[in-house]
Image (cartoon, helix red, strand yellow):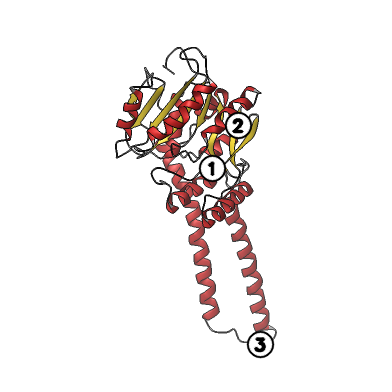
């Protein structure tokens, strides 16, 4: 990977976007936990924190540089623009040096106090230790309902099951990370990739806190897009569903046509006006447009894949890196 010879055991991977006020509070809470966990470890063998600045427009990069001046175990990447959280996570996995990697958000909603327990389970032999929220009490009712519906829908449609109430906060063994790094797709849904990779997994429960600094970057439309990406990248069931819908409509249409012919020829009942015919035509038109939309989601992803553009572009690096890993 072109990185320092001495690699730490643990990399804390932190994607950030416009979080200038969140960097210092994050480090003040996380660093003491890591210092306690790795007390007495030889220099360079304990831990590192890797920030990935995903095209921030505020002073996030300057805040990271300022903290790096007093803590050499902080590493950082700055991407050339906002590529999205999934790409930022992928960049972090490419550059992370640790034998274990834990992605975590800078907003501290995912509890850093769960990190020692994750490490303990990893040392027991588990290669993926994912965090599970004990409850979603800090979420609104609508977010809880839509999250439940999403997990239910995704796990029904996809072979790659996602544990309910599990996010990106998890420990990944180096073996798992190397498998994920070999996956070539550009349309990435990281939770789906984590699930697809498999390996020996277990869960650690934690309490999710409300956000203290900044505001969420995931509004409704971004969450909707992420949900579509998750299903489309993990399953072809939506395509098959429309084959079944088309077959069912065709069968019902033939049955209805046979009934009309029988009523007209055998019983002499006149066929009603055009209202029912118009409604039926509009229904079929709506179904066809909806099915074209589903097909378009998959065609659009094929278009993105065949262009073969880099998943991300690194503008600047800070810390231990010598060379950039090969562009994927």
> Contact, CB < 8 Å: mark 1 with mark 3?
no
Give the quadrant of the C terminus: top left
Dot placed on the residue nearer the N-terminal end, 1 or 2: 2
Report which quarter residue 20 is drawn in. Answer: top left
> Contact, CB < 8 Å: mark 1 with mark 2?
no
Q: Is residue 123 left or right of residue 92?
A: right
Report which quarter residue 64 is drawn in. Answer: top left
Q: Nearer the viewer, mark 1 or mark 2?
A: 1
Q: Tell me the residue that label 2 is attached to.
A: 129
The number of numbered discs placed on residues in the rendered structure image is 3
Residue 43 seen by the camera: yes
Q: Tell me the residue that label 3 is attached to.
A: 268
Residue 310 seen by the camera: no
**Mark 3: few/some/many CA within 10 Å (<14, 14-19, 20+):** few
On the image, the x and y values in percent for residue 288 come to 51, 61
Q: Is residue 76 left or right of residue 104?
A: left
Q: Tell me the residue that label 1 is attached to.
A: 208
Label 1 vs label 2: CA separation? 17 Å
| Residue with the most extreme right position | 266
| As drawn, 38 above or below 277 | above
């Amino acid at each position: 990977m072109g990185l320092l010879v001495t690699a730490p055991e643990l990399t804390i991977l932190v994607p950030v976007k416009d979080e200038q006020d969140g960097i210092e509070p994050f480090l003040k809470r996380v660093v003491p936990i890591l210092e306690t966990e790795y007390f007495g470890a030889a220099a360079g063998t304990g831990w590192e924190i890797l920030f990935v600045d995903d095209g921030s427009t505020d002073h996030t990069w300057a805040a990271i540089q300022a903290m790096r001046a007093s803590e050499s175990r902080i590493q950082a990447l700055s991407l050339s623009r906002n590529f999205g959280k999934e790409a930022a996570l992928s960049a972090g996995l490419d550059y992370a040096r640790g034998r274990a990697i834990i992605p975590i958000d800078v907003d501290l909603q995912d509890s850093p106090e769960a990190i020692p327990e994750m490490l303990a389970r990893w040392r027991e032999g588990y290669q993926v230790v994912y965090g599970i929220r004990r409850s979603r009490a800090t979420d609104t009712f609508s977010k809880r309902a839509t999250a439940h519906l999403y997990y239910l829908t995704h796990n029904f449609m996809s072979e790659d099951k996602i544990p309910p109430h599990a996010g990106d906060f998890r420990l990944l063994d180096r073996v798992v990370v190397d498998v994920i790094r070999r996956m070539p797709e550009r349309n990435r849904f990281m939770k789906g990739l984590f699930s697809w990779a498999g390996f020996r997994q277990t869960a650690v429960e934690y309490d999710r806190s409300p956000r203290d600094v900044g505001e969420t970057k995931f509004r409704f439309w971004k969450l909707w897009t992420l949900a579509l990406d998750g299903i489309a990248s993990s399953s072809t069931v939506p395509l098959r569903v429309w084959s079944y819908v088309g077959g069912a409509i065709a069968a019902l249409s033939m049955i209805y046509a046979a009934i009309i012919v029988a009523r007209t020829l055998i019983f002499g009942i006149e066929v009603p006006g055009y209202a029912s015919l118009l409604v039926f035509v509009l229904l079929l038109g709506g179904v066809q447009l909806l099915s074209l939309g589903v097909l378009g989601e998959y065609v659009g992803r094929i278009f993105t894949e065949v262009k073969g553009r880099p998943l991300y572009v690194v503008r600047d690096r800070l810390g231990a890196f010598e060379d950039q890993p090969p562009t994927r």
